Image: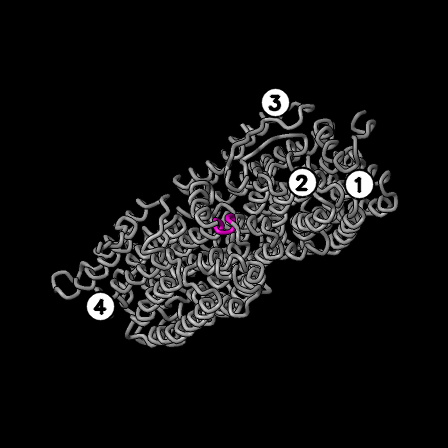
Amino acid sequence: MTSALLWTPLAFGLLGLVLPRRLAGWWATLGAVATLGLAIALLAGFDSGGGLQDTVDVNWIPGLGVDYSLGVDGLNVFLILLTAVLWTGAAAFAALREQERPHLFFLMMLLGETATLGSFLAQDLLLFVLFFDLMLVPFYFLFGAWGTDREDGVTASAATLKMIVYTLIGSLLMLVAAIATAVLSADGGHVSFSIADLASQPLGEGSQRWIFWFFAIAFLVKMPAFLLHGWMPDAYRAAPLPALAVFSGVLAKVGAYGFLRIVLPLFPDATVEFQEAMLIIALASILYGSVMAFTQTNVRLIAGYSSVAQLGFITAGIFALRPDGADGAILQMVNHGLVVAPIFIIVAILAERTGSEDLREMGGLAMRAPVLAALFLIVALATLAMPGSANFVGELYILNGLLQAKIVFAFVAISGVAMSAYYALRLYQRTMHNRLPDGIASREIGLRDGLVLAPLVLCILGLALYPQLILHRADPAVQESVGAVEGPPTPGTLAKK
Amino acid sequence: MNFHAPHIDYAGLSPVIALTVGVCVVLLSAVFRPLRRTAPALTILTLAATAGLLIWQWNDPQDLVAGALRLDDLAIAISLIAVLMAASTVLLSLREPAAEQAGSGEYHALLLGSVLGMVLLAQAQNLVAFFVGIETLSIPLYILCASNLRRERSLESGLKYLIVGSLGSATLLYGMAFLYGGSGSTDFAGIAEGIVKGPASDPLVLIGIALTGVGLAFKTSIAPFHQWTPDVYEGAPTPITSFMAVATKAAAFAVFVRFFDVALSVQASDWQPALAVLAAASIAIGNVGALGQRSLKRLLGYSGVAQAGYILGGLVVASEAGVSALVFYLAAYAFMNLAAFAVVVARERETPYGDDIEAVRGLGGERPLLAWPLTISMLGLAGLPATAGFIGKLYLIEALVEGDYTWLAVFIAVGTMISLAYYLPVVAAMWMGPETAGDRRRGEQVTAPAGPAIAGASPEADPIDPDAGRRPYLLVPALLATAAVVFFGVIPQPLVEFAEHAGASLL
């Protein structure tokens, strides 16, 4: 089951190569839908108290101690579903539009989905690193070959190269760190990369320190966090929007997920030692991302910097090192994925109407497009964590966890909530309200685009009504992950209500 | 008086005998006019026979020629890599002007002679066989580098290689003399015994180790003894470059491992840190040198220096896992390089740009079948997952961490990051279009009737064959090598077992 889920996208992508060009996009969408079906079936059969389930465990490279080991638990089940949902939306949106070299485009999209699912599913440390690195390859091609060159001379391939170098700096160090973890943990015995085995015998404190940072850098670059975000502005401006929607919606979460899956259970001592350093990075990301988001005029960058801030929130939730903070972080990962992907799709729709992605050249688009405006409004309100949205619940959990762990940090983080209201509303108003610039017609969203966008917005609304769907299922796994750090799980957290 | 004829193990010697016979037959084929065209076929036949005999001897370690040679799995594994590379070089050399100009028979006979040297070298376990092997390997290569007689660069390349190579050989020989002086034996095992019996930290032995190490570093193009590599690689006929890049390195590393891990193992704590520093220097210099190279052959030359640094890491730890990792990486490297060079050869014949990066611009759209091998090869050399290169790095890093050389493992990771900055632009050139003005301007310069300014081409540029890349003798090796890179990236276990066998034969 898990294996089928993992390889379905790639299988569809490869089969799609032999189909005629005009079918490539719809075939890929079909592949994404099939994956979504499997992901939903996985969730339906998910037992929230059952720990790791649907496991696959096969010796892959026995000589090196690497296993092909997959599994689902509360940490990843919703991220898998998020991946499947967003890829379906992005593939359908891309299929509606003419793509150059469609075969390769959709092959890369689906390879990206397999790699992302792989990094969520992997229960073997090396397999995780492998999929984590593999995610870069399709996005290198997607951003570089289908991206847009900027007028000021920054080519898509240069922007993409920068992104790859940045992210691989992290992930290659992570490869060394992963191998070191396994070898040091085996201590001369048989090397095993199984995450469960490694968690049961933590390393000495000295090794944990440097290994912690090697992993942390890889994950922080991916998010991206403040100071390690240098690749983000160029890459976001170059990327083709359907690919960017999934990139920003899902790939950034792999970093946050990595903290919960690997760093907390495997390096508990170092996690406690560097808790404050990580919180400072998280808060800096919140402040920097928010401030940048409300000074930018490029719509992509507003969404990009807001992601920096949101991921800062998620990191802060994780490093509160309390179950409620981490529960909130998981909920917020899904929430953020669900709002940022529609924003990029809306950006694409707006750019088709105005010919620009600059706020100053937009405005008044709500005039004759009430449906588009309504959809956008829901997304914008969810972004600013309006009470009643699932984002509100997520931020509440995160702040609650943070307040109880480190009260000073919580006060700073709260200011981030206020700022998110400003940039989300600014984005909405400047595009949808105000005066319509000359030469631009307000047009309603097309039926087919609407059919892509509406289900995503419905997911946001659904989660807003019932966030316990995630919290309830994530909690046992979160307790276990965070419990590795703080000792026995503490009863009576919010999720138990 | 009884006369005892020495026992000769013909089965063990059979690969060497097959190659020797092959050299003679191929050389003679050039004499008889009707047989002239058969040299490539005869060469392939010889190589196939050699490979068959080698595989026959697999898993049956034995000493040969009074202990001068040892045919174990390490020797066989390395010999198979050399034979594979030689066979693909024959295919890549079909219709190559160098082979025509130098005479097909001579060209192929020299190639086989070099393979003979490699097979000997991989088995050598005494200083004499070691030196004979390394010279048998090198001398034909000096000539082959210069075999493109009408191109100045090819002649220059041959001469440069001759001079630097002789210097390397001389250093090596000098070091051997010191070691013999210090230990009183030419036999690898005897040297180890002699060192144990002799005084601790005998200066004669230490100087010997240093000089032999330098000599071997020349042959394996380890920095700072690599300066010849980019020039020679660029000037030599491309099929020969592909052969040198992998086969020479493999054979030299085989003897490097056997010599250091057997003869000098007692002194391991002395040479390990020194070799680790050399490996680190090689990684740094190779990767930085490759940045900004426009000639693909120079780029692969510098990348080879860096890769040699990674491979040396497997020797540094002096463990079984290290040797296995080294063999695995060499095998992976052979496939990755073969895929890349086959495409470079094809584009050299198809376009007027020689081996300039312009030659592959836009290849992804026009000729995906040629673009994919080069793409996969670049991604593999850069160590991205789903290629054998990733598993090779994993194997090396695991061996290094186990051997307490974690800092070198981190260095490999850092070097790999730098390497992306030159591997990926090649991929970008193929798939991401010549959109910028800067690129187009540079493109125009090169479009002007092939002038001497172009890397790799010369006024007497070879005639253009627009269909070269569709010819099966180029396409099939490229695609097979690509398939191997991906296959061993996804299902590495067979190659891991092969490497483990080879690694287990020493320590």
Mark 4 chain: B
Per the model, the C-alpha gap separating discs 1 and 2 is 16 Å
Q: B462 or B180, which is in the foreground?
A: B180
Q: Are marks 2 and 4 on the same chain?
A: no
Task: Work out whether disc 4 and disc 1 sit on a shared chain.
Answer: no
- Hey, which quadrant is residue B60 in on the image? top left
Q: For the residues labelled 3 and 1, say whether their Cβ atoms are less than 8 Å apart.
A: no
The answer as to whether the residues below labels 1 and 2 share one chain is: yes
Residues under labels 3 and 1: Cα distance?
31 Å
Question: Of B472 and B123, which appears nearest the observer?
Answer: B123
Q: Main secondary structure of the magenta part?
A: helix
Left or right of A50 in this view: B132: left
To which quarter of the image does residue A153 belong? bottom right
- Under mark 2, the amino acid is Ile
Where is residue A390, by image quadrant? Answer: top right
Q: Which residue is mark 3?
A: A45
SS type, badge 3: loop
Q: x%, y% of residue A479?
A: 75, 31
**Chain assignment, label 1:** A
Earlier residue among tags 1 and 2: 2
Q: CA distance from mark 3 to mark 4?
A: 71 Å
| Spatial separation of the CA atoms under disc 2 and disc 4 | 62 Å
Q: At label 4, which amino acid type do we have?
A: Gly
Q: Give the residue at mark 4.
A: B103
**Residue flagged by tag 3: what amino acid is it?**
Gly
Q: Name the residue tied to disc 2.
A: A262
Task: Please state which of the two labelled residues, at mark 3 or mark 1, is closer to the viewer.
Answer: 1
Give the quadrant of the C terminus of chain A: top right
Q: Please state the extent of the stretch shown in magenta in the rendering.
A: B320-325
Single out the mark in the foreground, 4 or 1: 4
Q: Are marks 3 and 2 in contact (CB under 8 Å)?
A: no
Circle 1 is placed at which residue position?
A320
